[in-house]
Structures are given as structure tokens and as C-alpha cells.
Image (tube, grey):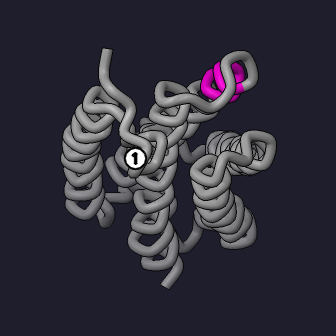
């Protein structure tokens, strides 16, 4: 069993925890490659709209701004949750993580509604190459958020049952890295898909 080092944050307090965090950074590297590939394909196909709508006709900014606000705020809140965890405030940490997940659910709800609106308007994955890669990119990010909601909820259950210890703190911290990553990906989607699309 790894010896606990009390001079570092709880999530880094054992050698095993260090290795898990390093391993997760490696995993995020693979995720970066995945999304970089999707963005590359998007930029290649963005003008191949066929008889379907272009981004300017399709994108409605109020829902996108709501999604962006929800995800950016959730990223800020999870940062507060990690800080609360580091100073031993378990209840505050859980509140911040719950708020993070609620905002993540808001984001996902708006995105699902956005997809349904596209489909209702006849803009489906089969309509054009542009819509195909758009829905693949947004859908991949949305699936990552969905997984994040389930993962975050399972971590909260573990913290509630076992309290904050080296293992639960490590899991909660790794989850925060994942959530921040989703936020960064969304900033790229917002900037290079939606904003560029409406200009």
C-alpha cells in the first residue's frame, strides 16, 4: 500500500495517485488527437453543403450562448470544488460538483433540443457532408458530456459513502481534469464552428 505524503494535496498524496493522474494526462492526449481529427475533417467539409443549409442559416446563437455560459460556469464551479476538497471542506466540494453536473445537464438538454430542431427542419446527418461532420463533432462532444455526468455522479456517491480520502480525492481531481478538457473543446467548437459559421 502506498504511503500517504501529507505535504502535497490529497489527490497527489500517494505514488499510485501520481501515476493515475499522469496516466489520465496521457489519455487526454489521445482525446486531443480525436478532436483534432474531427476538427480537421470539419474544416475540410464545412463548405460542402450540397442542397442543405449553411451554418449561417442553421445556427441560432441564443441557445449556443446558453450552452457556452452553462459549460464555462460549470468549469469554474468544479475549480471551486477542487479548492474546497483541498482544504477539507467535503460538503462544499460536493455542492460545487453537484452544481457542475446540473449545469452540464442544462448544456446537454439545450444540445439535444438543438439536434431535434435541426432534424425537424430537415437538416440531418444525410443531408450534406457539412451536416454529417457537424453532427459527428457535436455528437462526440455531447457523448463525452453525457459520460461525464454519469462519472461525476458516481464520484459524488463514493465521496458521500467514504468521505474524502486519497482514493476519492484522486478520482474527483481526475474527473475535474476531464471536465475542464470538455470545456476547452467547447471553446474551440464555439469559436470555429458557431462564431465562424454565422459570420
Tell me if 162 is positioned left or right of 185 in this view: right
Give the secondary structure at mark 1. Answer: helix
Kindly indicate the quadrant of the structure image that contains residue 155: top right
Q: Which residues are magenta?
A: 154-159
Whole-percent x, y for residue 41 in the image: 22, 52
Residue shown at 30% from the left, 22% from the top: 2
Residue 120 seen:
no
Residue that appears at 26% across and 32% down: 15
Disc 1 marks which residue?
137
Magenta segment includes 15? no
Residue shown at 56%/47% (left/top)?
123
Name the residue nearer the viewer: 30 or 142. Answer: 30
Q: Residue furthest bottom?
A: 199
The location of residue 135, given as percent across then percent down, is: 46, 44
Q: Quadrant of the N terminus?
A: top left
Left or right, residue 123 beside residue 138: right
**Is residue 8 placed above or below 164 in the rendered structure?**
below
Compared to 186, does 57 lie above or below? below
Mark 1 is surrounded, within 10 Å at the Cα level, by few (under 14), some (14 to 19) or many (20 or more) other residues, namely some
Q: Residue 27: percent from the left, percent from the top?
A: 25, 36
Q: Residue at x 35, y 47 (%)?
A: 133
Examine the rendered structure and indicate whether residue 89 appears above or below residue 18.
below
> Which residue occupies the foreground of this view, 198 or 68?
68
Amino acid at each position: 500500500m502506498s504511503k500517504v505524503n501529507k505535504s502535497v494535496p490529497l489527490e497527489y498524496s500517494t505514488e499510485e495517485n501520481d501515476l493515475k493522474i499522469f496516466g489520465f494526462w496521457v489519455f487526454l492526449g489521445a482525446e486531443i488527437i480525436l478532436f483534432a481529427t474531427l476538427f480537421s475533417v470539419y474544416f475540410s467539409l464545412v463548405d460542402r453543403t450540397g442542397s442543405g443549409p449553411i451554418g449561417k442559416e442553421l445556427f441560432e446563437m441564443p441557445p449556443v450562448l446558453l450552452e457556452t455560459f452553462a459549460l464555462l460556469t460549470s468549469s469554474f464551479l468544479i475549480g471551486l470544488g477542487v479548492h474546497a476538497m483541498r482544504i477539507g471542506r467535503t460538503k462544499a466540494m460536493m455542492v460545487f460538483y453537484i452544481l457542475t453536473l446540473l449545469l452540464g445537464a442544462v448544456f446537454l438538454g439545450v444540445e439535444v433540443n438543438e439536434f431535434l430542431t435541426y432534424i425537424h427542419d430537415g437538416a440531418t446527418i444525410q443531408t450534406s457532408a457539412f451536416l454529417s461532420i457537424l453532427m459527428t463533432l457535436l455528437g462526440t462532444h455531447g457523448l463525452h458530456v453525457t459520460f461525464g455526468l454519469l462519472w461525476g455522479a458516481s464520484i459524488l456517491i463514493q465521496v458521500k459513502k467514504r468521505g474524502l480520502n486519497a482514493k476519492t480525492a484522486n478520482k474527483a481531481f481526475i474527473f475535474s481534469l476531464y471536465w475542464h478538457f470538455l470545456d476547452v473543446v467547447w471553446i474551440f467548437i464555439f469559436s470555429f464552428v458557431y462564431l465562424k459559421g454565422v459570420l
